[in-house]
Image: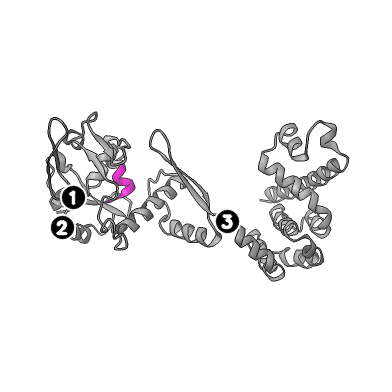
């Protein structure tokens, strides 16, 4: 423990010295002497530093002359490197306001943790720089946005920025859907976050607010032929938008769904369109939920809100839609079941 604390102190001293040397290097036109247009470009190529970190180091090196108390406390071991980063960010944002307040700020945050240090500095800036905070908020509103694109293999890539309030709401919702990992949990945090986001989307679509779809499943429309439902690939098994589905994905989606029968003639003409019906009636669904209470996968206790009702023998293969062939199972374990991975859900008592 002492070694780790000492190592953090030594690393901090080295970081402080690096900032001083970058500042000195710039003052002597070092980048130009080595044929580089900027210190950032020099660090990226000569020192093989990542672009973002190089840019941040150069920015800090230019502000340290305005933060002598911060640098002194850092090299004396009174502040950690992360606390110094927070202070230098404040100096960068409002240099004219930071200088007169620096010594007081250093004294206040010296005995705090990193998160409390950031919060103190945020409150300080809100107090002294109202117009700047408002400008930041306006800029954040302009930067907000999410991109969603589909790759050739059907995977969807998300990328974007959320405002602090919207981001906090999303993170809070995801945290609420990510209980501590259960026994045998093999998903990474990224994968669990993905599954939580899917649960959020499905929960909204299942709610009464989705008047367009009537709160029914599925909200992904699938077009398939009978052999595909019976586990035979190569025919028709795709989404309404033309994205091909694997047989296991199709099985998972159609296990608990509404079904519309469409009969086509030899030339593709529509012969008959049957009425859409629920595979599992609402009353039976309520009974399965009352019996199972939560996901029946061993070690999983996710609530019914985040579960599907699974046909242990798929209805397309003759499995009855009856209580002894149905079980409540969360969507993650439902997908594993149809992929044939891991264990089947435990048998039901009675």
Residue drawn at 79 percent across, 46 percent down = 19
Label 3 sits on residue: 142
Q: Check the image and report above or below for 230 versus 116.
A: above
Q: Of the residues under marks 3 and 1, which one precedes in the sequence?
A: 3
Residue sitting at the far right = 28
Task: Name the spot of residue 139 as percent of width and height, x first.
Answer: 61, 58
| 329 on left or right of 114 | left
Residue drawn at 33 percent across, 52 percent down = 300
Inter-mark Cα distance, 2 to 1: 10 Å
Secondary structure category for the residue under label 2:
helix
Q: Check the image and report above or below for 29 versus 126.
A: above
Label 1 neighbour load within 10 Å: few <14, some 14-19, many 20+: many
Of the numbered discs in the image, which one, if any, rests on residue 284?
A: 2
Of the numbered discs in the image, which one, if any, rests on residue 326?
A: 1
Inter-mark Cα distance, 2 to 3: 49 Å
Task: Name the spot of residue 155 as percent of width and height, x first.
Answer: 40, 38
| 261 on left or right of 138 | left
Magenta span: predominant SS is helix
Residue drawn at 29 percent across, 46 percent down = 334
Do callouts 2 and 1 mark residues in contact (Cβ within 8 Å)? yes
Q: Of the residues under marks 2 and 1, which one precedes in the sequence?
A: 2
Reply yes or no: does residue 334 show up in magenta.
yes
Instruction: State which region is magenta.
Output: 329-335
Residue drawn at 78 percent across, 33 percent down = 36
Task: Name the spot of residue 101 as percent of width and height, x first.
Answer: 78, 67
Label 2 neighbour load within 10 Å: few <14, some 14-19, many 20+: some
Reply yes or no: does residue 225 show up in magenta.
no
Task: Name the spot of residue 115 as percent of width and height, x first.
Answer: 63, 60
């Amino acid at each position: 423990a002492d070694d780790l604390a000492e190592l953090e102190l030594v690393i901090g001293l080295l970081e402080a010295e690096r900032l001083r040397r970058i500042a000195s290097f710039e003052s002597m036109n070092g980048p130009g002497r080595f044929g580089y247009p900027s210190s950032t470009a020099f660090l990226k190529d000569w020192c093989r530093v990542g672009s973002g970190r190089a840019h941040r180091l150069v920015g800090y090196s230019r502000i340290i002359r305005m933060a002598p108390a911060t640098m002194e406390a850092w090299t004396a071991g009174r502040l950690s490197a992360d606390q110094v980063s927070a202070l230098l960010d404040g100096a960068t944002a409002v240099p004219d306001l930071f200088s007169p307040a620096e010594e007081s700020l250093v004294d206040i945050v010296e005995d705090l943790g990193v998160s409390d240090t950031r919060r103190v500095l945020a409150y300080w800036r809100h107090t002294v720089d109202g117009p700047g905070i408002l400008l930041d908020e306006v800029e954040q509103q302009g930067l907000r946005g999410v991109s969603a694109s589909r790759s050739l293999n059907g995977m969807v890539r998300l990328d974007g920025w959320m405002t602090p309030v919207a981001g906090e709401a999303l993170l809070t919702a995801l945290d609420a859907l990510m209980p501590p990992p259960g026994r045998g949990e093999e998903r990474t945090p990224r994968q669990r976050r993905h599954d939580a986001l899917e649960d959020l989307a499905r929960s909204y679509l299942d709610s009464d607010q989705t008047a367009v779809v009537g709160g029914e499943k599925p909200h992904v429309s699938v077009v398939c032929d009978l052999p595909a439902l019976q586990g035979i690939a190569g025919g028709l098994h795709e989404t309404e938008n033309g994205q091909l589905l694997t047989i296991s994905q199709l099985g998972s989606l159609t296990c608990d769904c509404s079904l519309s029968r469409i009969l086509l003639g030899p030339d593709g003409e529509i012969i008959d369109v049957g009425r859409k019906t629920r595979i599992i009636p609402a009353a039976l669904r309520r009974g399965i939920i009352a019996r199972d209470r939560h996901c029946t996968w061993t070690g999983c206790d996710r609530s019914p809100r985040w579960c599907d009702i699974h046909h242990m023998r798929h209805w397309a293969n003759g499995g009855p839609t009856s209580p002894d062939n149905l079980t409540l199972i969360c969507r993650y374990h439902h997908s594993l079941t149809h992929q044939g991975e891991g264990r089947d859900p435990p048998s039901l008592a009675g």
